[in-house]
Image: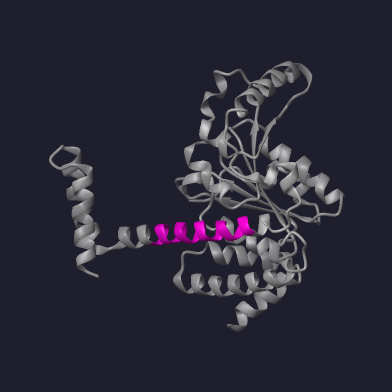
Amino acid sequence: MEQATAKLFEGLVNQDRASLARSITLVESSNLQKRHQAQLLLTCVLQYLKTENAKSARGVKSFRIGISGPPGAGKSTFIEKFGKFLTGTGHRVAVLAVDPSSSTTGGSLLADKTRMPKLSVDPNAFIRPSPSSGTLGGVARNTCEAAVLCEGAGFDTIVIETVGVGQSEFAVADMVDLFCLLIPPASGDEMQGIKRGIVEVADLVVVNKSDGDLEGAARRVQAEYTSALKFVKQRTPLWKPKAISQGGDLKKKREQQMHVWMWRHIHERMMEIFRKDQTVAKNLSELENMVSQGIVTPGLAADILLEKFLKKL
């Protein structure tokens, strides 16, 4: 291991916040040399966590929670209150808040630290806003790796807040132990923006803002979702009381999730290599025009580009 990487690893496992921040920046980098350094660091952290997790009866020492919901559901406010409750009971909480990206700068637009002022100054909390950079699912490309780094730094509760809800939000369910859907007290018509599929992958549905004038509306929404969820096939037995005590379940789930994310990384890297290929770039504009004019189908254009790309290999 390089000296710089070894120093970063040492600082990380000793719970140095600056080392954690630098480590996350490293895994978010698109520079090939830094990517290699990031993978070395992650390998060391995973080995360290394997040893630490072996000491836990559950097989893992941390717990990952994904929180999603439509704009205005109060996700950041909920996370701040929930985070303060956890730190007040002795837990260390890391919040990975995936923000929409600015199309101009590529940076975060919402700046979650300003929306969680109390939690951001809590010594037992760490908040990291990351731009989604157009990534489907509202989950930044390296969020899973960032969660591993936070666990290596001693945070026992990892909260991942996503951009919103939609069909592509399934990505968050593949990296957390519990996926929570936060919804506001609105009428059925207003809730049509929440895709049925998201409800199906949710382990927990929380009706937020259920007080004051909105209490009645919140109870109606709660009843609607309670009724609807009876017809949803259960995705995992983890949340049945009789299964919660099974120690190896979370460990097995984490292992399966790592396989899923390996293939997602392969797909993303292949697309990146494909798009940057000179032969593809040279023919892309012409084929796009031909597709627009109806001369060739999108499928045929894709086959032509792939054939030209594969000939070079």
Residue 86 % position (x, y): 81, 48
Q: How many marks?
A: 0
Give the image quarter of residue 69.
top right
Q: Is residue 223 left or right of residue 71?
A: right
Magenta-drawn stretch, dominant element (helix, strand or loop): helix
In the picture shown, does residue 67 fall above or below 152? Answer: above
Q: Quadrant of the C terminus?
A: bottom left
For image coordinates 69% across by 24% down, the residue present is 222
Q: Quadrant of residue 142?
A: bottom right
The foreground one among 293 and 210 is 210
Taking the view exactly as shown, the residue that stands out farthest to the front is: 242
Query: Residue at (21%, 55%) from the top-left corner?
Result: 305
Q: Any magenta on residue 260?
A: yes
- In this rendering, the answer to whether 294 lies above or below 177 is above
Query: Which span is picked out in magenta?
Result: 252-269
Residue 207 vertical position relative to residue 59 in the rendered view, above or below: above
The quarter of the picture where the N terminus appears is bottom right
In this rendering, would 127 be left or right of 286? right
Residue 45 or residue 203, whichever sits in front? 203
Query: Horizontal and vertical percent for residue 112?
Result: 65, 45
Q: Is the residue 183 above or below the residue 277 in the image? A: above
- Image position, residue 203 (x, y; %): 65, 40
Q: How is the image coloured?
A: one colour
**Residue 201 position within the rendered picture, expressed as x and y whole percent measured from the top left:** 57, 40
Residue 47 lies in quadrant? bottom right
Q: Given the current orientation, which residue lies at the most extreme right position?
A: 89
